[in-house]
Amino acid sequence: MKHMGIFAGLFAALLFSAAQAADPIVIKFSHVVAPATPKGKAADKFKELAESYTKGVVKVEVYPNSQLYKDREEMEALQLGAVQMLAPSLSKFGPLGVRDFEVFDLPYIFPNKTTLYRVMDGEIGARLFAKLEPKSIKGLAYWDNGFKQMSANKPLKNVEDFKGLKMRIQSSKVLDAQMRALGANPQVMAFSEVYTALQQNVVDGTENPMSNLYTQKMHEVQKHLTLSDHGYLGYAVIVNKAFWDGLSPDIRAQLEKAVKEATAYERQIAQEENDESLAKVKAAGTTEIYILPNEGRAAWHKVLLPVHEQFADVVGRDNIQAIYKIAADVQKEMDAARVKKPAAPKKSPAKKK
Ligand code: LMR
């Protein structure tokens, strides 16, 4: 009997090393941004964790900077199984026929990141992922980038400054409406083409979080930048569903753990990456930076908020209402925390000796 146990152990060990010796399971992870961005760094972190947790059974190949595919092609490649994993911007699901993701594009819908994370990690996030399954895609997590800023070759202070400008946007009808509300002409364009289009004046300006603007060197070809935080850009980490479902449960569990930890890491670095990029753009001295003051913000709000109602039937009126409710709850909690915070103790006058 004792020998049986030894044989069983040896057999298991042999099986394990045979699995390791066999060809690894390859995950091709394609994305369109630079490696030194929140998404780029998190993709590399996922590779490191996934390969370590599966002891090399899974090999992750990360292809940054649209090396393999541009925005639209990468979605098709995922559905066909030519790549296994992507993290496209939430603004790029419209062409797939899932327009609800564009709720994230509504101008000024997220007053802070606490609200945003509750939306991503709660019912709305799950409901949106469920809509991908009939398209052969499975959603695993939401990654963060940041609030967007406007840039152009002329100052963008007042709404009137946008009149007639050709502004590059991602493939989202909400972003199209946002630019039209400002009086601009939106032009959909793949991310990899934006720098050249700005340089050659094919378009006059664009919007992006600072990490994308800096790593694509857009500041070299944009004389003016307005810190407006008028909208948000985040990502859905998605996989080819058949590939994912075909993995053994233990490998899938290790990969889920890797995604979870890479997500925590990504959200932790997103803000600091954007802050650092802003500092670098300032230091480069090529771009005049304008901070939109409160009065200016109010004027932008006035023309942009009607886009919510305009798109309510497209992105889901219930989704919009649920986000407003989460934002109001978060605000209440923040106010309560401020009231509860004990006042700093008054300094007692120094005792005389
Ligand atoms: C863009 O196209 O501007 C962004 O979606 C790029 C990205 O993936 O952050």
Image (cartoon, helix red, strand yellow):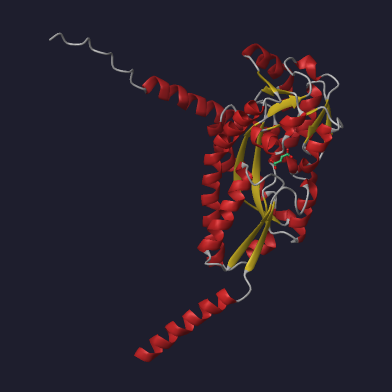
Q: How many marks?
A: 0
Q: Is residue 159 left or right of residue 276?
A: right
Q: Is residue 270 left or right of residue 160?
A: left
Residue 207 shows in this picture: no
Q: Nearer the viewer, residue 82 or 242?
A: 82
**Can you say which quadrant of the picture contains the N terminus?**
bottom left
Q: Quadrant of residue 167?
A: top right
Residue 280 screen position, x and y as percent:
62, 31
Residue 164 shows in this picture: yes
Q: Is residue 145 left or right of residue 176?
A: left
Instruction: State the residue at coordinates (59%, 65%).
Output: 58
Q: Nearer the viewer, residue 125 or 63?
A: 63
Residue 269 screen position, x and y as percent:
54, 40
Q: Quadrant of residue 90?
A: top right
Q: Nearer the viewer, residue 11 or 348?
A: 348
Q: Nearer the viewer, residue 26 or 141?
A: 26
Residue 185 screen position, x and y as percent:
85, 26
